[in-house]
Image (spheres, rainbow, N blue to C red):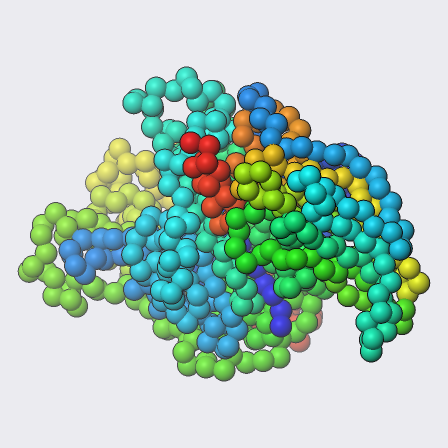
Amino acid sequence: MPNVLLIGWDGADWQQIHPLLDAGEMPNLARLVERGVMGDLAGLAPPSSSLLWTSIATGLYADRHGVLDRSEPDPMTGGIRPATRASLRAPQLWDVLASEGIGAQAVSWPVTHPARGPATCVSDGFVHGIPESVFPAVLEPTLVPLRFHPQEWTGDELQLFVLRWREIDQDKDKGLARLAVLLAEAVSTHAAATTLMEAGGAEFTAVWFGAIARAVAEFPDRQDEMYGEVVSGVYRFLDLFLGRLLALAGSAATVIVVSDRAAAAKASRAMFCAAGPGIDADELAFGAGLLDIAPTVLALFGFSQAPGMTGRAIPEVCVTAPVMQLANLAAHVPAENAEPAAEFDDAGYNDTVAAAHRVEAESARRVRDFHLAQVLIGQGRITDAVPMLERLVSDEPLAGDVRLYLAHAYYQTRRFDDCRRECEALLADMPESPAVPLARAFLAIGAGDVAAAQAHLRSAQERYHVAAALDAAIGWAYLHLRKWNEAEAAFRSAAASDPGMATAWEGIARSLLGRGRAAEAAEAALDAIRLRYDFAPPHEVLGEALRALGRSTAADEAFAISGRLHGRSPAA
Amino acid sequence: MTRKRLQSDRLERKLAGYALAGAAVLAPGVANAGTITSMPLSIPVAQGGSAGFALSGSVDFTLLAQQVDHTPFGLWNEINVTVSNGAQTLMSSGAVADLAFGALIDPSAPGVWGSGGKLAGESTTGGTGGLWPTNGSGYLGFYFQGTDGPQAGWAHLSTFADTTTSSLNIDGLAFETRANTAILAGDTGAATATPEPSTLALLAMGGAGLIAMRRRRSTNA
């Protein structure tokens, strides 16, 4: 029976890790890298931790697994609460495996509270001392005492993270207290996970650590004289834990370490590495995405992926093709095209909930709906996202970001008149909105004034600090105007800023195809597919390029894949 | 295109120091309090020989390289450890555990202690047994009965066994001078630049290390 260990490091990023590896300060991760494969994982939008980790655990987009944000409606108060299993519309990996008779356990994974079977579970409520955080309950007497309290830290230990901690006025500066909390949560998770692993009986263990992303959020300034070393210290700390987890898993286990996004860079790329039987040593892996992790783990146990999963088993990790089907497929089929639940209307809370709770709950619902729209856009289902965005704008006309998404969605679906109307309305209603430069850019594009569009986009770049996305937006503008050389240059600039941006390579492919360079276009489309196999548009571009090359059979296959992934033609 | 590691010897040295220090953030601070007695050794034991260790004043454990008749399973060339005087060895699945560098040896940990046995062995017909390598090294975890209670320690051993003979080399040994106090395999108590480095190393061990850390603090309070 295979033995698989899946470790999640929230917000971890190779760009932060490489210097530590080079300095020998993460020796356990270094050993894992040398024994196996490493690479980037193509990320997903929006960058919501609960949403992304649930996509990793289910192998599904958020519109299918149901976790759209870190909060959900609280049926007791009418307000909101942290997202719980109540939001889940699809089973997580460990429950799928446990249902197939494989011993499985999960520790601290997001959206696992309250702890329920069939797998052994220490929920994400455990580190906060919330009841019902251990399943089965018989494990509570063993695990609950292992909860590490922030007050157990001494100053000398925190000195390893904050060298000059004695100089801190802790009445005014709560940084040490926040550090103590995030480190304590990591210790609690590690203690529970190691205790379960030492007891044996599980072939699959999933452990999640939130410390890196928390440290990046709490102490973002790496040049800060007092707290600048915290993030590096947390990486080293988790590497210590990794050593113990690797020892407990054993040399015959397949170990996978993943993140959900690069928190420090605010980039959608994530990191992963894997080592185990049959995996080549010290190699790079390409083309994997967050949605590939669940199929990969299933394949390691010999199972084909569950219906609805659009990812695939990472070939560098799964050297043997899976041959078994999941026994209880019906239990694993996710809800189709899940719309955001109209919880308030359905539950009849309109007349009973307090006004204050109603406001926060409505705000949280809009966030979830906005996230759902972004999830649909990320799948190329822009047409499906438009009515959702229209509803959001109708509810909250002053949400500049939402209006901008709507304008861009109109643009991408070739509803240029609607795009222009939306941008003009945005400029009229919110002349001071940070979205104004982008709106002006869209209007300039619609008028064919690319130079003006470029100027507005550069202006927006200063405010939004997302160079790759804006370069790509400029590229799409040039594509619309059939300025192929300029489009290619813009997309290559985007790819240089964010090498994991599949849509940049798709744009390069389209630019090359426009100039009749079909072979190069096919290569660029394949580069996009390597980054994100589950994204339909590059498959379609590949099909067009292959058809131009006279390779009709291969072209038909590419179009078939695009259709299977998408179901409709994406808008360019 | 692959990622190649340079200067692996330097890395191994850093690994050893890192595991003891608990972190690579080398903040200047209080050195280790020196509660560990360490003995760098190189004691060869050929087949037919033995080496006994009297840490409590009387012999606590004995390492033997011997050929044993396990009729009807034939003759075996083995490395064994026997205990006496209330000493115990760290076990795993009923056999003497082959510990990795940095493994936790906690005399108060329940259910992991035993009365020694075979480390490694190979029969004259080629079968092998024991958790230890027939041509390798590892750490033996033990405790002996000190004046105030069980004192934990480790011995670094190189073991060899094949179809014709067995032998071992005792490469080093260390033990805690405080009773009921955990030690990490390989920890010689050398001064480090990090205050209480073993705290993070204990926490890195997980639940057992956390319990050991709390016990240490309550003992020292």
| Horizontal side, residue A519 vs residue B72: left or right | left
- Residue A460 location, x and y as percent? 40, 35
Foreground pick, A356 / B22: B22
Q: Nearer the viewer, residue A16 or A369?
A: A16
Q: Name which quarter of the figure residue A153 lies in.
A: top left
Q: Percent from the top left, x then y, of residue A461?
A: 44, 35
Question: Which residue ends up furthest to the right in the rendered image?
Answer: B164
- Residue at (61% x, 44% y) in the render: B145
* Residue A53 appears left or right of A402: right
User: Residue placed at 46% from the left, 41% from the top?
Assistant: B215
Residue B22 lies, in percent from the top left, at: 58, 36
Q: Is residue A480 above or below residue A132?
A: above
Evaluate whether residue A99 shows in this view. Answer: yes
- The outermost residue toward the left is A351
> Seen in the image, is A204 located left or right of residue A335?
right
* Residue farthest to the top, as pictured: A167
Res. B193 image quadrant: top right
Q: Quadrant of residue A184?
A: top left
Name the residue at 80% across, 44% down.
B170
Residue A551 lies left or right of residue A396; in this view the side is: right
Q: Quadrant of the N terminus of chain A?
A: bottom right
- Residue B189 pos. (x, y %): 64, 31
Please report the residue visible at 61 percent of the width from the left and 37 percent of the height from the top: B176
